[in-house]
Amino acid sequence: MTDKVPETIARGFCSFMGITLKVAPGVLVPREETELLGITALDVVWDVPQPRIVDMCTGSGNLACALATKLPAAKVWALDMTPECIALLKKNIAYLSLQDRVIPLQSDLFSELVGSNLEGQADLIVCNPPYIPARTLETDRKSLLEYEPREAFHAGPYGVSIIQRLIRDAVVFLRSGRPLCFEFGQGQQGMAARLLERSGVYEPIRFVSDQTGEPRVAVAYKK
């Protein structure tokens, strides 16, 4: 997908889970591998009558808009900390006529939801967080920063700093028995499993693999 990023940005649009989205410089271009996260999220929430969904680190809003489109009764809170992402998210919400069901919020993870009526009420929290180790961004994956922002990738020395915060804070907003679903990088399953298990608040925990057999998505249910 990286090789296609300049072409996709120049075109101004991309396809994700069967919908068309606007893209722009300064915001992560949705990757094909994130569709696995979207499909997994649909699978765990399709039977909830009026699901309340939080899409954390929403970026362009690809997951939020795809889930809202495919779940007509859903309401989605879409959060990101950068103004560039929120600006593009609002454009995609309008482009897809989802103004009544997707709520954009500029927020450092869950900060803008603290004290809201979503605490203990979310049926699903989904997140495609930054998960590239800092040292890798300066070497092997340096090309990622040519067209997209550092904030979309950088995740501390081991690539799990945002995932740590996500696991810790998501439990405040989930209903009991409802899942947190998030994407992680190749080779990070062990770290994701340890963080979830050590939190002591999620069970059961499972992982979803891509077509190559590589685990890339975690599904963890609040006890």
Image (spheres, helix red, strand yellow):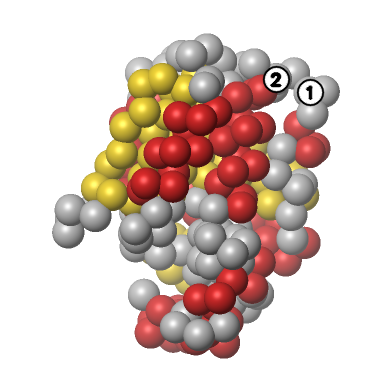
Note whether residue 17 is visible: no
Circle 2: residue type: Glu
> What residue did someone put label 2 on?
119
| Closest to the observer, 83 or 210 | 210
Q: Tell me residue 94's x, y (percent).
A: 63, 52
> How would you rate the neighbour count of disc 2 (Cα within 10 Å): few for under 14, some for 14-19, many for 20 or more?
some
Residue placed under numbered mark 1 in the picture:
116
In the displayed structure, 179 sits above or below 138; it is: above
SS under mark 1:
loop
Horizontal side of 120 relative to 210 (left or right) equals right
Q: What is the three-letter code of the residue carrying label 1?
A: Ser
In the visual, does 173 lie left or right of 67?
right
Q: Nearer the viewer, residue 60 or 216?
A: 216
State the quadrant of the N terminus.
bottom left
Q: SS of the residue at dot 2?
A: loop
Residue at point 57%, 83% (across, down): 138
In this view of the protein, which residue sits in the foreground, 11 or 154? 154
Q: Which is more toward the observer, 96 or 59?
A: 59
Task: Give how far across and how far down residue 99 sits, in percent.
Answer: 65, 41
Q: Residue at x 37, y 46 (%)?
A: 190
- Are the two marked residues, 2 and 1, in contact with CB atoms closer than 8 angstroms? yes
The x, y position of residue 33, in whole percent, is 34, 59
Left or right, 185 with respect to 68, comes to left
Q: Residue at x 66, y 66 (%)?
A: 151
